[in-house]
Image (spheres, grey):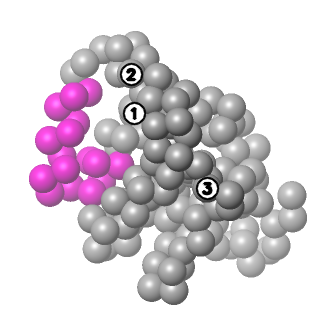
Amino acid sequence: MNISDHDLVNIEKRQNIVIFDGICHLCERSVLFIINRDPQKLFSFCSAQSAVGMYLQQKYQINALEDETVILIADGVVFERSNAIFEITKRLGGKWRWVRLLKYIPVFIRDFIYKKIAQNRYVLFGKANQCLLPSHDISDRFI
């Protein structure tokens, strides 16, 4: 894992980092969903398979791929599974805040559903041969 000093500085500047499975079509669509609803550019993204993604997972002692979860690192706090989704929608604001109402469902039920979808994500949504390559207009959102 080779992280340059430039990358480390760039990582430290970011406040809301979403780590996602870079070859999962569901994860890719989720990232694009967030980007399209985040005009303030609050969120930055990196694939779990990238050097930056591996560095962050090691730093925070998490494993996005093994745990089959999207991860949000916000203000030094790690959010996983359904809690990551709720925190992302909270930060998106607007009409997406209503999603937080689902947080009243007990976490063991929310995460059970989340895990079932995550375990079958490649079958249900497909798998790419390589990580998401962002277009020029959104490349600044990726680290």
The prevailing secondary structure element of the residues shown in magenta is: helix
Report the magenta residues as a range: 88-103
* Residue 98 visible here: yes
**Mark 2 = which residue?**
113
Image quarter where the C terminus lies is bottom right
Q: Mark 1 is on which residue type?
A: Asn
The first of marks 1 and 2 along the sequence is 1
Of tags 1 and 2, which is closer to the observer? 2
**Is 55 or 125 nearer to us in this picture?**
125
Measure how far apart labels 3 and 1 are at the Cα level. 26 Å
Q: Position of residue 24 (x, y in %)?
A: 56, 49
Measure how far apart labels 1 and 2 are at the Cα level. 13 Å
Of tags 3 and 1, which is closer to the observer? 3
**Mark 1 = which residue?**
83
Q: Position of residue 126 (x, y in %)?
A: 53, 46
Of tags 3 and 2, which is closer to the observer? 3
**Mark 3 = which residue?**
128
- Mark 2, other Cα within 10 Å: few <14 / some 14–19 / many ≥20: few
